[in-house]
Amino acid sequence: MDSRYAISIVLEAHLPFVRECNREEDLTQAGEEGRYFEFVSEIMMPLLETINRLDNDHVPFKLAIAISPVLCHLLNDAQLQKKYLAYVDKQIDFGRQEVERAYDSRIKKLAQDYYNQTVDRRIAYTEQYEKNLLKAFDFYKRKGKLEILASSATHAFLPFISHNSESLQAQMEIPAAIYRRHFGSCPQGFCLPDLGWTSELEPFLRAYNYTYTILDTHGLLCGSPPPDKGIFYPAKTPNGTFVLARDLYAARDIKKMIRSEVYRNNDRDAGYELPLEQVSQFLGADGERRKTGYKYRSRHVSNNQGITKVKTDDGKGIYNPAAAANMAVEHARDYLENTITRLKEAAKHMTETPISLLTHNVRNYVRFWYEGPQFLEALFRMASENEEVQFVTPSEYIFEQNLSTIQVVKPEFSSNGENGYAETWLDVSNDWIYRHLSRAMERMTELAERFPDDSGIKERALNQAAREILLAQSSDWPELLHTQESTEYAHVQAENSLRNFTTIYEALGSNYISTEWLTNLERRHNIFPNINYRVFRRKK
């Protein structure tokens, strides 16, 4: 390598399946689809803007991003594209009203900035990207600036389905075709959902030609034997898959930075604060308030024993974009300095170039860190002027090493969830899912074995059964139940997928399938249109 130290940033981009099948003329912001609209406007578009600026200014940068197959589907869904534009048009109309309404000059300026930004992003989405954001990411992948990592079909917490090899192979095999279609080839790296690792995954990663994966810090450090070079160098599993561990201290730095009181408070949206008549276009069918994207408050916070709390507004705390941008630059400088300091210490005990790897879920940008893309841009610009450090992609770093000397380690069961194991996805709030899911997974394999060559409506039903199983396996539902966020939605989604599967299973047993019911279900849960249920058959 050209530099003494290496840094790699891997962004995790995923959303649960939030598509709602409303009438074509109903283009209001429907329920949980608001998550998707926010994700596009406040994560994917700003991230592409950052990448475009860096590339246009010839700033050297390397970035890796794991785009989940569910998100790939949502971004390419024609109905969601149409509804997203309708949502953006509402934001533009609302912005005009806000510029006229605002009595405070600071809020008026923010409203004008948001309005201009929304107009510019609508033009970029329709004209520059032609509604195909995946194509834009693929463009930078082909330029060698971006590495795309794979993930499982529906972001399942893989350790919890590893006892059923047919379900595991489906979660690993289905994405391969999706990535080939969107990015020309299957990625070399596999990003474990929630960094969930168990040794049962090894043969599947190898079978589907994934070169490397990423573990949580303790997953590698507690491996057998413990790695000689800690988390600052790759190891290799007994089956030959390379593993990198995330830098725990880098993750802690980011978590601490997000708490800055000058950053925007994403919970304080005008849609929840203005009189109903002023936000009427953002009300749900039931009169429930929705987010508008116009947010005027900073994170005016106090800290009590490490817990961040938002204070009651006292007339202060209006968001200052310039101050927030300056803070993002300062945080980028601190992050770079802290990381280089750690790498210098690691280098004293190594002859190889040490690496610090940060994995970061970009959903946090919507929830906590509007300025995240600004931080990334400042970080790359600073690093371009520092000869000691170089940003690399994980695969680039691995293949610059002497692969024959990389230590073999058997990693420990781990995740990036609460306390580092599986508590997030298995506690009293969500344990009811697994007894039904386990039985349904066995039945899916039974169906694939019992109907190996069916066609027509039976094949349609079997393919839909496969979709329902995959959706039920999503780790999003137990996680939302655990965190008490959108609990009703998560409960309904998990329960409906399991119920739909059971209905199909029983219908195939009785040899009667309602064509109307199946057609409606295919329209609602249309994920993976080219799925083949035979992926759940036992390997001979």
Image (tube, rainbow, N blue to C red):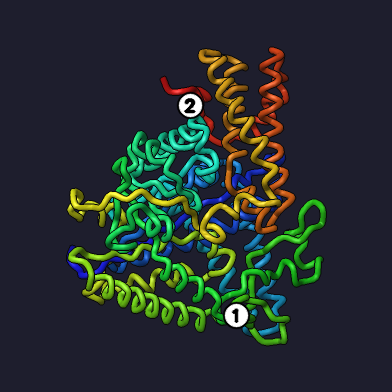
Query: In the structure shown, which secondary structural element does the residue marked by tag 2 occupy?
Result: helix
Camera-side residue of 180 and 335: 335
Query: In the structure shown, which secondary structural element does the residue marked by tag 1 occupy?
Result: loop
Where residue 270 appears, as percent x and y from the top left, is: 70, 70
Instruction: Specify the quadrant that holds the N terminus.
Output: bottom left
Could you say which disc has been placed on residue 452 in the image?
none
Q: In the rendered structure, which amino acid carries the disc numbered 1?
A: Tyr
Identify the residue at image location x=70%, y=51%: 428
Where residue 237 appears, as percent x and y from the top left, is: 32, 46
When the figure is inspected, residue 492 is found, relative to residue 116, above or below; the finding is above
Dividing the picture into quarters, in which one does residue 198 lie? Answer: top left
Instruction: Specify the quadrant that holds the C terminus.
Output: top left
Q: Is residue 155 visible?
A: no
When the figure is inspected, residue 145 is found, relative to residue 309, above or below; the finding is above
Residue beneath disc 2: 535
From mark 1 to mark 2, how far is it between C-alphas? 51 Å
Q: Is residue 324 left or right of residue 342?
A: right
Identify the residue at image location x=58%, y=70%: 114
Where residue 431 appears, as percent x and y from the top left, is: 67, 46
Identify the residue at image location x=59%, y=65%: 367
Camera-side residue of 528 and 340: 340
Identify the residue at image location x=33%, y=37%: 209
Residue extending farthest front: 225
Q: In the rendered structure, which amino acid carries the disc numbered 2?
A: Val
Residue beneath disc 1: 319
